[in-house]
Every structure is written in structure tokens, then in C-alpha cells.
Image: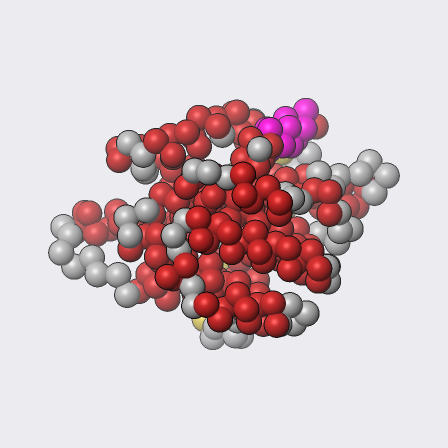
Amino acid sequence: MRNVYTPLFVLITGTCMIFDSCSTCSRQQHISGDDVNNLSGADSVYVNVARNVFYSLPTPIEMSILVKNLGVEYRSTLLNDPLNASTYATSNKMALNFGIYVTDLVYAGLFNQTQTMLRYKLAIQQMIDGLGMSVAVDNNVLKSLEENINDKETMLRILAETYSSCSVYLKENGRDFLSISVLVGGWIEGMYIASSQTNENLVSSEKQIERLVIDQKLTFDMLWQVMSDSINRDIPEINELMTEMMGLVEAFDAVEISTDTSQNKVVFDEKEQTDVIESLALSSVRKETFENIKEQIRTIRHNFVK
């Protein structure tokens, strides 16, 4: 099968155009303030490349939006029960499920599930407290989230600011590896919700979901690069994550993607007032490969939430 898809950068740019305060934009603001002048030229280039990769990854908020845009129906049974929040004892489990719960809250919010959102707000609060990030989030922020629970734009803005503040706090306190865990948790949850929605009777929806899952190979490659860059630091939590996800690496390796640069085109972004290069990529995957990717995602997600 051959699919033509929009690259991740363009996809996220489109998300930012819809929600001006989305967390990718917020995180980019934090990058510019980091001082790398004391590094050598080579080290400075490496750090900037690593940051660009990390900040190109979709946040849990963006993963929910991607799933909602598939046009699928809301299924509460796919979400992680907020009551499980009290069972996560380690920092890494809390970080993974912080990402998962943010994804679930936004997913429920995009389907106007107000009471469910309130339950996930409490679960997120538990993860924030458990990770010692309460000092990074103003006491009135989550209260404001509850007060604006039915205002999608405000809700997304508040969550984006909360997510950004927590990520910065973790980095500034030497626990940036937990930010990676948050991203991994949110990404896996979005992939799990999307890939669990396939229905042989809904051919168009099936193809859309398959396309999203396969297109996310590029995202996963970047995610894996971020984790791989941490190997030299010998971080047990990241090493554990990489072991957990090795099966997904092998599954995605069976997906063939090639970029036809002759099809690249320059499009003027009216909002940003700048030119953006759009490229076309071709992917091919066998049915068993797609099913294997889905199974690997299901297994990883099960281990994250148990």
C-alpha cells in the first residue's frame, strides 16, 4: 500500500494555527531563552539539534487533537481510569501517566465529556503533586481549568501552560528525563486510542487511522533518537523505557518510507508570514505489519497504566 501524507512539522504547525497557545509554541519560547554560549561550536550545534528534535515532538495535547480529527467516535473504555492515579508510586510511572491523563482529558474535552474531564483534572493534580511539581503550577491554574471546563479554547490554553510549566520545572531541576517520559506516555496513549478505533465496516475511517499510525513512524524515530541520546547518561528510567519499546522499534522498521524531493513545494503561511516547505513522502506497509504495530502499542500502553 502507498500513502501520501503531510509531514509532522506541517501537521503540528496546522495545530498551532488553530490553537494560538498550543504547547509546542509555548515550548519553543523557552528554547530561545537557553544560554549555550559557553559550549564549544560542535557541542552547541549538537545541543540545538537535540532541542529541535525534542520540541518537534507532539505533546499529549496535540496527540488528542490528532485523534479527534480522525472523525472517530468517543469511547470512554479506551481511557485510563482516573482512579488508577493513586496506584502509581514511582516518578517514572507518574510521569508516564501524567502524559496519558493529559491526553485523556483533552480527548474527553474535545467530545464535550464535562464530568469525565473533571475526574481527569483530579488525576492530573495527583500526578503533579506526586512529582513535586506543585510549585511550578499556580494554585489557581487548575481551579481556572475547572471553571472553564466547557470552553475548549481556554481549556486547551490552560492545559498547554500547565504542561509547559511542568516540563520547564523538570528540566530546571535536573529531571528532564521525566519530560521524555511524559511525552512517551502521551504519544503512546494517543496512538493506543487511535489504533483501537479501527473498524473493518468503516473503510474510510480504517484507512485514516492506518495512515495516522504509519505516519507517526517519523515521530517515533525522533522520540527514539531523544531516548537514545540519553544512553550515555545511564538513566535507569529511560533505559527501561527503551527496553519496553524495543518491539515497537522492530515493528516500525518494517514500514518503508521514502521522500520524493522532486515533489517538494513552498507554501506561504499567512499567519506566520513566512514560507514553509511541504514535502511528500510515500509509505508502504503490509497488513500484518500494521497489526503488529497496533499490538506493540497495546502491550506498551497496558504496561504503562498497570
Q: Is residue 54 left or right of residue 271?
A: left
Quarter holding the C terminus is: top right
Where residue 291 appears, as percent x and y from the top left, is 68, 28
| Residue 259 visible here | no
Where residue 227 appears, as percent x and y from the top left, is 38, 37
Residue that appears at 71% across and 59% down: 115
Using the image as rendered, state which of residue 37 and residue 214 is in the foreground: 37
**Occupied quadrant, residue 289:** top right
Residue that appears at 50% across and 39% down: 88
What secondary structure is the magenta-colored segment mainly? helix
Where are the magenta residues, as a range? 288-300
Q: As displayed, is residue 3 above or below residue 19?
A: above
Colouring style: secondary structure
Q: Is residue 8 magenta?
A: no
| Residue 273 visible here | yes
Residue that appears at 38% across and 62% down: 136
Q: Is residue 296 magenta?
A: yes
**Occupied quadrant, residue 62:** bottom right
Residue that appears at 48% across and 28% down: 244
Q: Is residue 196 left or right of residue 50?
A: right
Where residue 49 appears, as percent x and y from the top left, is 32, 50
Quarter holding the N terminus is: top right
Where residue 161 appears, as percent x and y from the top left, is 47, 65
